[in-house]
Amino acid sequence: MTNLSLYTVRAVIILDGDGNRLLAKYYARGPAEQVYKTVKEQRKFESTLFAKTKKTNSQVVLYDGQTVLFTSSTDVYIYLVGDPEENELLLLSALQGFYDAVCQLVKYDLSKRKVLDNLDMVVLALDEAIDDGIVLETDGNVIASRVSKRGVDSIDVSLTNLNEQTLIDAYKQAKERFNLALLR
Amino acid sequence: MSFKKDEDTDELGALMNLDHSTVLQEARVFNETPIRPRHSRLLLAKIIFLLYRGDSMSTTEATNLFFSITKLFQCKDMSLRQMVYLTIKELSTISEDVIMVTSSLMKDMQPNSEITYRANAIRALCKIVDPSMLPGIERFLKSAIVEKSPNIASAALVSSLHLFKDAKDVIRRWSNEVNEALNGKSLSQGPSFFGGGSSAQNQVVSSSKIVQYHALGLMYAIRQHDRMAVLKLVQSFSGQNKSSSWMGGSSPMLRSDMAHVLLVRYAVRVMENDSSLLPQLYMLLEEWMGHRSDMVSIEAARAMCQLKDVTAKQLTPAVNVLQQALSATQKPTLRFAAIRTLNALARTHPEAVQPCNVDMEGLITDSNRSIATFAITTLLKTGNEASVDRLMKQMQGFMAEISDEFKIIVAEAVRSLCRKFPGKHSVFLAFLSGVLRDEGGFDFKRAAIEAIMDLAKNVPECKEAALAHLCEFIEDCEFTKLSVCVLYFLGEEGPLTARPTVYIRHIYNRVVLENAVVRAAAVSALAKFGVSPVADPSLQRSVRVLLKRCLDDRDDEVRDRAAWALRMADGDQSLRDKYIRDDSTFALAVLERKLVEYCADSAAAAKGSFSFESIPRISRAQEEESRVRARMENMDAVLTGTTLSAPSASGRAVGGSESAEPGTPGLGSGAAASGFMDSFEQQAQYASKLNAIPELAAFGDQPLVSSAKPVELTESETEYVVRCVKHVYESHIVFQFDITNTIPEQVLEQVEVVMEPEEDIEGVLQPVLVVPITELKCDQPGTAYVAFEHTDPETFPAVAFGCTLKFIVKECDPATGEPEEGDEGFEDEYSLEATDISAGDFMQATYIPDSHSLWESLGTEGEAIETFALASFDSIEGCVTKVCELLGMCPLESALKPKSKAAHQAVFTGRWLGRTRAVARTRMTYQKGAGVTMELAVRSEDRNISQLVVSAVA
């Protein structure tokens, strides 16, 4: 059965160097396609998948009836699980896009530590790369650019006296005072 | 990121031990004012981490969390807002009342908001929105689709796709907008495009042009049922070279490779079944194979290989493309895609793949084991006798380097090769014995010795050499099970060889040196040598001496076997034949189920010991056959990757058989298609399902006979699909109807089948029971039953029944499958094809060993003979298959495979009502013009039954 829809990705999994899950997102559209229903089944799948792939650098494997693309760096393994009949190169470009984006976001130092430190950006990158099983973007630069960087909790540092007010309120208030001062 | 080194970093580093409840406690931060965007964002990331890690969250927890998160909308910080969107999406499936944030999201998706806001708000909104609310946001989505920013356009298109299945009607109206997005007018990067809000890298231009991919996908979803429209779509993009209107800027161009992949699929979909379009399709595919992107060229080549009536000439360019891909050393995925396609192609067109043989041989040692596996299994199909030597040499070279799991695949592959090229047996045997000497685990060794045994059985010339290798193997075998296996095999095959004494020495060595289990097996093997009909007296004497020594063994099982064997050796020939040379065996599936039932039922033991009478028997040949078939299926499964890891594969298999309802075998599992082993297993499934219904369970433990194959009472493509299975009990007949409703808009209630006999059956069959299906939703098969009492045990009726499906129809919402409230429904009927009951339905297809002597012993007393002139058949094969079907009996050996076209003899065995043994012999001749002339003779223990069996054909 050729897949005529855009739904191509069944799961994205990030494991650490011991095969433990860092992140896993399974995209399930209806019970028929939900291969691993419980977390237990998912973990079993992940650990056997890890055992099968950890020593190789072979990029693609057919495992348990699914096409799995994977890539790794020091102690992080990223897997993308796709429909068995899906074009492997298409899946690869999706994985590559996500991988590139994550690399860029962690300043090209992809390790377990960095992934956890930058967790907010990694999950956002995943969200920008794949939307519920549909590949949203494959260009790593674009994905990375769409992930917003962390803001600063500046308000409570510099404007503590104005708590309960936003910056704009503060600005307005300041402006009014300034005007008053001018008028005086 | 200069601000990264702060207390949050450490906190995130400790995420692995993050505690669920602590995070939820911390979520109070969201209610604080002013909102701290950075702190909140990290906390949200933790919540998502919890979810992605696999923690489950209760609905209350999620809902509470959700409502505190909505407070964060007060803060306009971009970095926080993006995380809020994601969290809302993740929580939307767990939490209640997610609809509350609709207005906040709608505000963010207004055209004047920032791009990142808009794209994310659209995706989040579509996740929580109810299809009924769609008209309210339709305007925004439509304008978002044609938006210049690819970010927003993609978000809108993808979200529309998610919504499509629930809101087809609304989204169909957007085809103009989708078309505009598709044709790329908006693809030029406008100045209005800004990337992430606070980020410095504002204008990152997407190189993937992926909007087109999304637009094409949605376009197809909208048009998929309109063949002409899809065809036009395909043609508009495929004529790009000839397009003259390029200047207008409206020329459709596919700039996205992924979109092009879709186009290939759509093209195949609409053009493959139309012979007038086929030449165009071939041309297009060939053109696309030259596409600069591997993704597209592989897709086109693969599509070409999968076309139904493709010729060798048309395949050549595709194979060329794939062949080139095979040598792409830097791209394992490309090699993988190519070899996988070639592997599938080799099943249908092995000769077309042959040019790649040399390239594939190079891949046997590929570091990617999936690729190597595919290479080997493909070579098996395409290889010729000449290349075998080279192949084996190559495999020998790397056997030491690969893992056990992979070695098993190689052993299996060699085993298949043995069957294909028996002439090369010496090469294979040398290879197998070589690998047996190497290190290896149990499964691998087993695969290897099984391959050798296979070879010994199928290639008589190498039997002695193979047995010698096996003897050598057990001299130093660490696996008890394998020793036992080999000893058994030696016992079977050894006595028939020219010099049995050689093997006896090896076997007796085991008796001296091994553990009890192996010793017992060795004694049994010795016994077989002793009682073999070809054994000369001196050999028999020697064996007896050896067996006598075994009487002093430490282990009682060994002593028992030895004593039994001696007794056999002294007994007469017929006794020996009965025990030692029995060629039938129990249908193990049934035996197992019966034993389980027997053990589970405490009352059964009191009633008496377990009875073997009711267990159907099959011949060893059949058992072997079904084992071979299972193995072949396994091999095929390896290709799809399902058995590459044994534990999870078996787990999946169990799951599969559970999901396939016992009442609908063959639908879910292709395995139940043929074979007697399967049919017994299937009957066991039927029985457990029937016994679940109290009224039917009252008829008896299980049906005496169940029909092997379900009969279709409708065409497979109709609104309701019905298949019928018949079960014959001691004094009842039950019709089982497996019914599937294929209309998503309907729910059927009170579904039952009304059966009208076409002849008078008064006094023979009495309708007693109708079991309806209370509710039948779309695509959830249900089972209804109709039961008759067989009131006159002397007559076995042959009667047809007209069948009608009766039910109450209710309209329902296809999405939920719940009938609309207040819908009373209306009664409706649907007429089915007739079903009938005939003599064949009372016959259980059981293998009876030694049918020849049974035939003789039954004598002519219970014989019925009739001659038929069957002009309608134009071959013996067709005729014998039909006869077998009608008789419902078990065909022996070559009954179904006539050797000559002009004349054929076939023997069938079976048990009438599972009790009375019957043997049928047919002789048939075929003459062109006159059809088949057949003489059918049936002998059984009861003359009436013989007559009835004959009448089954008439």
Image (cartoon, coloured by chain):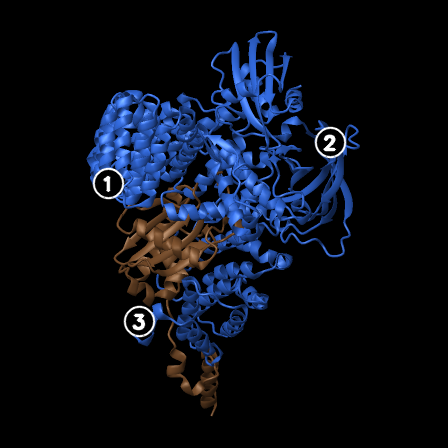
Near mark 1 (Cα within 10 A), the count class, few <14, some 14-19 or many ≥20, is some
- Distance from disc 3 to disc 1, alpha carbons, whole Å, reads 62 Å
Give the residue type at disc 1. Answer: Cys
User: What residue does disc 1 label?
Assistant: B477
Give a yes or no on whether discs 2 and 3 share a subunit.
yes
Chain identifier of the residue bearing label 3 in the image: B
Q: Amino acid at mark 3?
A: Lys
Query: Which residue matches tag 2?
Result: B801
Task: Judge from the rendering whether residue A107 lies leftward or rightward of residue A68; answer left or right.
Answer: left
Colour displayed for chain A in the image of the structure = brown
Q: Where does label 3 land, which residue?
A: B4
Q: Residue at x 56, y 61 (%)?
A: B128
Q: Earlier in the sequence, mark 2 or mark 3?
A: 3
Report the chain shown in blue: B
Name the foreground residue: B879 vs B605.
B605
Asked which quadrant contains residue A101, the reply is bottom left
Q: Residue furthest bottom?
A: A184
Please name which of the two marks, 2 or 1, marks the residue nearer to the observer.
1
Task: Pick the residue in front: B565 or B161.
Answer: B565
3 and 1 marks in contact (CB < 8 Å): no
Q: Is residue B353 left or right of residue B33?
A: left
